[in-house]
Every structure is written in C-alpha cells, then in structure tokens.
C-alpha cells in the first residue's frame, strides 16, 4: 500500500511539474505583460523605465530561464506576489480555496445523495412511471446550461422573491453561520442541479447492470428480501464503476464552479482563476491553476482508494491475485 | 521419425507471460508459465488432439502455432522453416497456410459483415483472385460446409450457433490451408449440433487431406476425430501417442484420471467414485518435480524432487511417450 | 441406497409439478417457453433433467422458486410441496422457503457468488436470514459447512473472496451455501458444466455423498447425458419446452423410447467407432415463436409420419414407470451394439 501511494505521489508531482511548464508557457504566449499594463496605467513611463522594470522583474530573460527562476522560488516556498490583490499569492489563494472546497463539497455530496436515491429508485422500477419521471428530470438537469440556471435562480429567488442574496459570501459587516449559509444556498443549488442529472443516469445504469448479475439471482435464491438484495448485494457492486465516473466528473464540477462563482460573485478558486487571467496576474493564475490540477489529482487518488476499498479484487498491496 | 520434415515441428516451445504491477515502479511479480519445453511433430494429413484442463496451456499452444503469440523460447518449424525466425513475407505465406477456428462462434465473427464477406475476407487479405473468382470460391466453400447460397447475404446474428460455426470453418477453409487449428470448436454448441460439426470436420479432412490440431476438453469428441493425442498438464506434455493407445493403455496417471473422470452415458449411477483430488496447478507457481505430483494417486518420493522427461514406451504402440517415472508400471491399468 | 427402483418410486413425491407452463412477454407477444411440464421429485433421489439450450430446463427451475425474470410469468400449472402450491404462493410466503427448504445452485460459480463479500459471509447470510442466527454463530456454522464440502482449512478459507478461490472451490462454497439450512430439495442448474473434467468428477462425487448424508431430493439439470447418467435415478427429457420422455435412469439409458432421446444418445461420439461419421439429428431445435404443428420434434424425426404433424402427442406410459410423448415410441437403438 505504501508503495502504491508513493508511486501515485510521484506520478502526481510529475503531472504537476508538466502542468506548471505548460501553463507557464501558455501564459508567456498571451499578448502583453505586466509592464505593458503598467504603461497603460501610467503613460508617463518612458521606454527606458519599461526596460529597467522588465529587467527588474526578470521579464527580459528567455521563457525557460524565467520558468527556472520561478520554479526555484516556488520550491523554496515563495509562490510570488499577486499584483491584482497586492498580497502574496498564497494569502490570496487559501481563502478562495476554502470557499471553493465548501461550495463544491456541499454540492457534490448533495448531488451524489440525490443521484443515489433517484438512480436506485429508477433502476428498481425500470420501464415504469417512476423510472420515466426520474429520467425526465435527469435529462432536464443535464440539458440546462449552468449560466442560464444561475441567472434564473437569481431572478427568481433574489430579485422577484427577495428570499436569498444574489452574490458574495456574507452580509456587509460579517454575519454568523446562518448568514453565511444563506449566501451559499443559490450557488450550491445551481451546481447541484447541473450535476445530479448525469450522476443519476450513471447510478441507474450501473444499478440496472448489477441487478442483472448472477449473484443477484443467487441472493434471491437464498431467500434474501428485496431490501437486502438491493442495498447489501447490489449497491456495493454498483458503486464500483460509479465512483470512478464521479471522480472524473469532479474536474467537470470544477469548471462548472468557475462559471457559477463568477455569476454569483462568490470568491472561490473559479472566480480567482478568472480574475487572474483577465487581469494578467501571472503569478496568481499559475498558482491557482496548479491548485486546481492538484485538487483534481487528489480526487482521482481518493477514487482509486475508494475503488480498492469497495472491490476486494482490486489490490494495491501486491499480494492479491 | 523420418528424414522428411514434418508439416509442423515444435521444439522446446516455451511461452511465459510476465506479470508486472501497474504503474511507473511496478515490480515484476513472476510470470505465467503457459508452456514449457513442448516438443511436437505433426505430420501432413494427421489430426493431433491437444487435451487438458483449463490453464494447461492448450490455447497458448494453438496461438503459438498460428503465430498469434511469439514464443519466449524454442522453435516452431513449418515444413522445416522456423516461422518465428523467417522473414516477414515467408511468415505471411505460412500464415495463409495455417488457419484457425475459435470456440465462440458469437464472438469470433464480425457482426457487421455478412456471411459472404466473412468467408471471403481471407481472400482479400491475401490478395487472391479477382472479384468474380472470389465470389465463386466463397459460394463453393460455403456449400462445402453445408451453408445454403441464400444464407450468404445474412448477418451472423441471424444464424444459429451451429451455422455460425460453419461460417467460421468456411472462413478457415477458403484459402485451402494445410493446417486448421480448432480451439474448442464444439464446446459452445448444443449437443445435437456438436455431432454435425464434428462430422463436418471429418468430411473436410476426407475431401482435402487437411491436417488438424484439435484442441478440446471433450474426450469423447477427441477420441472420435484424433489420430494422435497430446496431453498437456501445467504447460508441459505429460503423455502423447496414438489415440487408441492412450485410451486403451495410457501410461500416465493424469491421462488415466482424465479418462476416468468423464462420465459415460449409460454407465449407470455411480455410487463410488475414483476422483482425482485437488485443483489444476497454478501456472504462476507450478509445483516442483513432476507438476502432477500433488494430485497423483501413485506419487513416490522421486516425483517430488525430479521432473520426469517424456520417454518413449517401446513396448506400447509406436510413438507413445509418457513423462512419468513409473510409466512402465502403469501398463494395462 | 441402491434398492430396486420400483420400491423407491412407491415413495410419495416431495415436490410434484403438474402442467407447468411459463410464458415470456416479448415484442411479438407472449412466447411459451415451458409448455405443460410435469415431473416429481422424491427425497433421497436425483432426477436428471436433460435438454439443449432453449429447451426450458432452467426456466422451469426458476419458475418453481419464483425467480423468473420480470418479463416471465407462470401461465398454468401446479407445483405441490407439503400441501402448498409453490406457483400460487404469494411472494412473501415463497421467499422464506427459498434457500431454506428449497435451495438452488447455478452454473457459473464465479458469477454466482457476490465478488465483494467473503464466502464465509455469503454462507453465513443464509443462516442469518432463515434461522435468525447471530452473526458469530452463523459464521461458525458457515465454517462447519465449508469443512463438510471438503474445503481444506475452512476457518481461513471462509475469509477468502470468490476470486481468490479456484473454480472447484467456488462451486464447493456455492454448495455449502445451498445446503446450509438442510433443504428438502436441491436444484442444481448445470452445476458442473463450467468445471474441468477432474474437478467436475470431484463435485459430482461430493453431491452424491451429500445427498446420502442429507437425504434431500435433487433436481439435476444438465445438457450432458454422461453426467446425468452418473448421478440420476430418474430422467426427464425436455425439448423445445415440452417433456419428451420421463423414465427411470436405468430404463432410459438402456432403452430410450422417444426418437429424440435415442438421437441424443446416438450422436455422442463415445458410442460410434472413431473416424466414422456420427449419427446426427438433422436440423436445429425449433424457434419457439414458430413451432411446427403437431409434435415439435417431427421436422427432425426419422419416424415422423402424417399423424405426427396433426396433433401434439401426450405423455403416455410406454412401460412401467416410463412415459414418452410419441406416437411411435420404441427401442430402435440396441444397447448391445454399444462399442464401448
């Protein structure tokens, strides 16, 4: 097991290293740099000043050297300074990361819970009315564009009904737990709705497939009741493929969060990435994108471990068959 | 046996599949010893049956003969030419002369091709004839295997299992190969259809002097069609010889148990059994000494330590070899 | 154990199936896959049910246990067990019988066992369901069952998952699961078909032994006449959903009365000298949606005549204890010519 984890850790670091090169290089391709922004902000800068500033920031060096400089600093713990927020990058990223994990975490748990309940119910009633109704809802949820849903949510619950706030994380001047929760409702609801549909379809398909297996017939032949058949014998087997899909889907959820956070002006990673790229804040964009990558890698690792836990045929210890 | 090269001669054939953990730092976990040091001669016009239980290496042997697997060691010679060391054009020419029929007539036929397309495909692959000749040969081969001309435009799912196996046999026979390797060609078929297909194999042999390697676990069918039998256990040949000799006077305890294990219809209800204990051995960690010793009813001390070499049994029929330390003593059991 | 068949047939049936008819709902309307099947099972005796794929043998078994797939239903018939009709019992009264009084084992021991639970767990579960044993005690009993079916080191093996066992061990575990509650009836559906020859022999031996110990009635479903011959006291032959012949095993294998039974036995390669063409039954089993009129075997039957195509022949007694659904039954096949 330790060997497997070590293996995965090395792989993850390799992926992160490659990603950092790719992102660095892509950002180098973007037109304009920090100094161009400074010039546009302060027309009094002379070309000599600009050249001096470029040298000062190391921007006159070739991109490979700039990358190495950044890497050296990053490895020693200095992730650079966010020009946009006028603070060290890490200080800007950490609260946003916390907000995003909260938003994604709650939405994910809710979407998965709804997906399991509805997916199992649909599978047990295949080709009956309940199944059709759940499928209809799931397809509707898959088909709704997330930005449109977010805007409709705001229109309905914030503008028309005035029940819930449309943006931010807390009331001006700060608020308690309840206040913060009120701010979360709309973004969480939107993300949950856009992701539960496909999850429901996965759970339903996996469950139907599992219920067809020979060992389900064996369980019935043993005299097991329907509840035992479904929740003890089928569910765990049905979960195995679903877990993998859910982990892959987490990346999709993250990109969904980028749109949702921007619309709800929710200060999370998605919005931070968006702001950093739009504002040419290299350091910040680089680090936020790497964090996003790391989060996705972590979810995949978690899925693989869950996989091994669910399925005794999967062994990472090396003593399995 | 003779100076002329056999149609196929297998010498020291060994096939191992490495087992490796997934990942960048995956360690090797040993290997599956599918075949070890197999020697065989198949003469032209002869039918050799290869029998044994699952995991004994019989399918791997078939795939090595058909060039679907490259052996780890040893040689397969086709009319004296070592096929795995031959240049690519020569290998392709040999491949054309060695065809295969698989167990599952559902999985081995492309569901999107018609029967005629499936049967004619080898002609296209080996660029044989023009369109009119190809369609003539397709029709001719189809009728040889008992398919009706009207069936040729239909797709595999429209046929029964037996008809599908006929299509697979036609595909193998259309190039007029020297050797057909049939890997469990009956086991997916219904009982009443099996005899039809077995008869078809024998018909084709009579018509065109085909040579067969017939891989099967069904000893009844094997006894019926085979001239010679090779018994595989744990990737090695433990006994080989003329079919009737093996059935009448096997000189290996495994072959004897295998024959004994198959219930014969009409033999009556068995209240006493002489069954072999244990399971077929692991191919990853085969037993030392004689691989059969953990299950052998006649095991002695020497069997645990020393692997018996296949030895010709001069007092039995011609070409009868057994890899048992006590082969002579098993006479007539 | 081997007392004369006549004395044993006097024993009352523990299960008596009469006119079992099963239909499947298909896109082209209902399809009758089992048509008026009747047979009886007796304690301590094995009934071999033979037939090719699609003959309705598995469906008959599943119907008895109420395990038909959702599109299948019992259209007619009775299956009397201890005064109750299994086919008419509501689900909540049939369920307690399944796995307790009537157990079933299936063909593929790999897929019949749940891959994510240990075999000890799966055996113990039967006892937890039916005898409400606490987990620890059920586990102890499960280990005991594993020992009885000849699994070495059962306490350790109980912890193993199905994929960690060989095919033979798995089928032993499945048998242990089926016999855990000491059933009156054991239905084995192609229980040895997926196994290697030497392992098949072990399992057949085990089943013979266990039947001696437990005295249950066994319905042994197989397409393999050799296996049935080694195990069965009585034989029921199904063809395209109907019983063709029903006879004590010794009579059946010695002198089969129905032309289909005769054909099935004659086509076996072990009965023809090597190298000679085998006798065959021409054609293939009929499509159940397009059955021929009259006897459904008539199109393939060497003895078929005009009257065979007129009406489906009923099962009629041909000799003591034997019945065949044929207008021209008779022993064309002479066992004296058996070359083995």
Image (cartoon, rainbow, N blue to C red):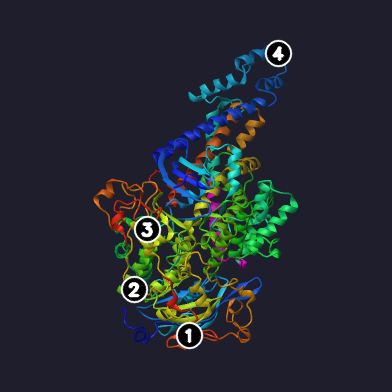
Residue A246 percent coordinates (x, y):
54, 48
Magenta residues, start to end:
A105-129
Marks 4,2: beta carbons within 8 A: no
* Left or right, residue B220 beside residue A209: left
Earlier-in-chain disc, 2 versus 1 = 2
Between circles 4 and 1, the one closer to the viewer is: 1
Mark 1 Cα shell of 10 Å, populated few (<14), some (14-19), many (≥20): many
Say which element carries label 2.
helix
Pointer 4 residue: A47
Residue appearing at x 36%, y 87% in the figure: C10
Q: Quadrant of the N terminus of chain A?
A: top left
Are the residues flagged by discs 3 and 2 from a single subunit? no
Same chain letter for marks 4 and 2: no
Observer-side mark, 3 or 2, equals 3
Q: In the image, is residue B87 part of the stretch drawn in magenta?
A: no
Which residue is found at the position 53% from the left and 74% from the top? C56
Disc 1 sits on a residue from what chain?
Answer: C
Circle 1 or circle 3, nearest the eye: 3
Number of residues whose C-alpha sits closer than 10 Å to that of mark 4, classed few (under 14), some (14–19) or many (20 or more): few
Whole-percent x, y for residue C130 in the image: 37, 71
Distance Cα–Cα, label 4 vs label 2: 100 Å
Q: Main secondary structure of the magenta part?
A: helix
Residue assigned mark 3: B255
Q: Which chain's residue wears label 3?
A: B
Q: Secondary structure at mark 3?
A: helix
Instruction: Using residue A20 as the reference point, say whether residue A259 is left or right of it.
Output: right
Instruction: Write down the residue under mark 2.
Output: C211
Q: Are marks 2 and 1 in contact (CB under 8 Å)?
A: no
C-alpha distance separating marks 4 and 1: 110 Å
Q: Which residue is mark 1?
A: C323
Residue C121 at least partly seen: no
Disc 4 versus disc 3: distance between alpha carbons? 94 Å
């Amino acid at each position: 097991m330790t060997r497997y984890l070590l293996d995965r850790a090395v792989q993850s670091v390799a992926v992160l290293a490659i990603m950092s090169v790719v992102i660095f290089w892509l950002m180098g391709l973007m037109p304009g740099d920090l100094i161009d922004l400074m010039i546009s902000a302060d027309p009094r800068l002379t070309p000599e000043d600009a050249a001096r500033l470029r040298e000062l920031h190391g921007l006159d060096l070739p991109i490979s050297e700039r990358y190495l400089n950044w890497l050296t600093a990053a490895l020693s713990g200095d992730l650079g300074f966010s020009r946009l927020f006028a603070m060290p990058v890490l200080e800007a990223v950490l609260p946003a990361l916390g907000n995003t994990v909260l938003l994604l975490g709650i939405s994910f748990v809710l979407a998965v819970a709804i997906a399991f309940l509805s997916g199992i119910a649909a599978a047990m009633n295949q080709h009956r009315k309940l199944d059709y109704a759940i499928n209809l809802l799931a397809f509707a949820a898959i088909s709704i564009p997330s930005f449109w849903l977010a805007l409709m949510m705001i229109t309905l619950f914030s503008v028309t009904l005035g029940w819930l706030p449309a943006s931010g994380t807390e009331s001006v001047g700060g608020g308690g737990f309840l206040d913060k929760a009120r701010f979360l409702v709309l973004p969480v609801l939107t993300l949950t709705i856009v992701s539960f549909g496909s999850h429901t379809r996965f759970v339903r398909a996996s469950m139907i497939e599992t219920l067809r297996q020979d060992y389900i017939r064996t369980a019935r032949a043993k005299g097991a009741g329907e509840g035992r058949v479904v929740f003890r014998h089928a569910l765990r087997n049905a979960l195995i493929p679903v877990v993998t899909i859910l982990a892959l889907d987490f990346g999709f959820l993250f990109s969904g969060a980028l749109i949702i956070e921007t619309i709800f002006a929710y200060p999370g990673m998605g919005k931070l990435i968006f702001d950093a790229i739009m504002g040419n804040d290299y350091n910040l964009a680089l680090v936020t994108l790497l964090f996003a990558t790391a989060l996705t890698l972590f979810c995949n690792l978690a899925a693989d471990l869950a996989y091994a836990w669910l399925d005794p045929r999967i062994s990472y210890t090396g003593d399995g068959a | 046996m003779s100076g002329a090269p056999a149609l196929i001669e297998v010498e020291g054939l060994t096939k191992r599949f490495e087992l490796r953990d997934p990942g960048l730092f995956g360690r090797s976990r040993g290997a599956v010893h599918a075949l070890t040091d197999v020697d065989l001669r198949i003469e032209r016009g002869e039918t050799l049956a290869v029998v044994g239980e699952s995991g004994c290496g019989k399918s791997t042997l078939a795939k090595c003969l058909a060039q679907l697997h490259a052996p780890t060691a040893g040689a397969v010679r086709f009319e004296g030419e070592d096929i795995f060391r031959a240049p690519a054009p020569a290998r392709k020419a040999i491949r054309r002369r060695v065809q295969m029929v698989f167990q599952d007539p559902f999985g081995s036929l492309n569901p999107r091709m018609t029967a005629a397309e499936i049967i004619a495909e080898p002609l296209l692959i080996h660029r044989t004839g023009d369109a009119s000749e190809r369609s003539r040969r397709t029709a001719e081969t189809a009728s040889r295997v008992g398919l009706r001309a009207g069936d040729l435009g239909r797709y595999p799912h429209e046929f029964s299992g037996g008809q599908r196996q006929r299509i697979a046999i036609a595909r193998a026979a259309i190039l007029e190969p020297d050797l057909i390797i049939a890997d469990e060609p009956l086991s997916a078929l219904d009982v009443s259809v099996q005899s039809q297909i077995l008869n078809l194999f024998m018909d084709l042999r009579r018509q065109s002097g085909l040579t067969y390697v017939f891989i099967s676990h069904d000893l009844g069918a094997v006894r019926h069609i085979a001239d010679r039998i090779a018994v595989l256990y744990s990737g090695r040949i433990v006994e080989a010889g003329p079919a009737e000799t093996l059935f009448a006077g096997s000189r290996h305890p495994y072959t004897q148990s295998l024959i004994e294990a198959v219930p014969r219809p009409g033999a009556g209800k068995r209240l006493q059994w002489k069954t072999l204990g244990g399971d077929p051995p692991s191919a990853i960690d085969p037993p030392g000494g004689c691989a059969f010793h953990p299950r052998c009813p006649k095991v002695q001390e020497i069997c645990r330590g020393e692997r018996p070499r296949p030895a010709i049994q001069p007092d039995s029929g011609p070409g009868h070899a057994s890899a048992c330390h006590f082969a002579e003593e098993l006479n007539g059991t | 154990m081997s007392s004369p068949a006549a004395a044993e047939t006097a024993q009352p049936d523990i299960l008596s199936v009469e006119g079992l008819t099963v239909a499947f709902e298909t896109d082209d309307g209902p399809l009758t896959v089992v048509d008026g099947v009747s047979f009886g099972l007796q304690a301590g005796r094995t009934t071999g049910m033979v037939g090719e794929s699609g003959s309705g043998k598995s469906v008959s078994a599943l119907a008895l246990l109420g395990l038909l797939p959702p599109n299948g239903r019992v259209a007619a018939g009775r299956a009397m067990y201890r005064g109750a009709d299994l086919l008419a019992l509501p689900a909540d009264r049939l369920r307690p019988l399944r796995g307790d009084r009537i157990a079933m084992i299936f063909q593929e021991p790999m897929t019949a066992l749940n891959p994510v639970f240990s075999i000890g767990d799966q055996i113990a579960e039967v006892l937890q369901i039916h005898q409400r044993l606490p987990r620890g005690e059920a586990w102890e009993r499960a280990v005991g069952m594993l020992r009885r079916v000849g699994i070495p080191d059962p306490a350790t093996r109980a912890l193993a998952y199905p994929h960690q066992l060989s095919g033979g061990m798995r089928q032993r575990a499945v048998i242990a699961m089926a016999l855990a509650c000491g059933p009156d009836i054991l239905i084995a559906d192609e229980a040895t078909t997926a196994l290697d020859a030497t392992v098949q022999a072990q399992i057949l031996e085990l089943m013979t032994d266990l039947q001696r110990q437990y005295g249950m009635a066994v319905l042994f479903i197989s397409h393999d006449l050799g296996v049935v011959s080694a195990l069965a006291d009585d034989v029921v032959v199904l063809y395209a959903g109907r019983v063709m012949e029903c006879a004590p095993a010794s009579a059946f294998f010695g002198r089969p009365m129905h032309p289909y039974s005769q054909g099935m036995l004659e086509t076996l390669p072990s009965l023809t000298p090597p190298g000679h063409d085998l006798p065959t039954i021409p054609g293939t089993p009929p499509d159940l949606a397009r059955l021929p009129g009259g006897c459904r075997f008539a199109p393939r039957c060497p003895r078929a005549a005009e009257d065979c195509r007129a009406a489906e022949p009923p099962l009629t007694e041909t000799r003591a204890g034997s019945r065949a659904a044929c207008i021209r039954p008779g022993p064309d096949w002479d066992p004296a010519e058996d070359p083995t």
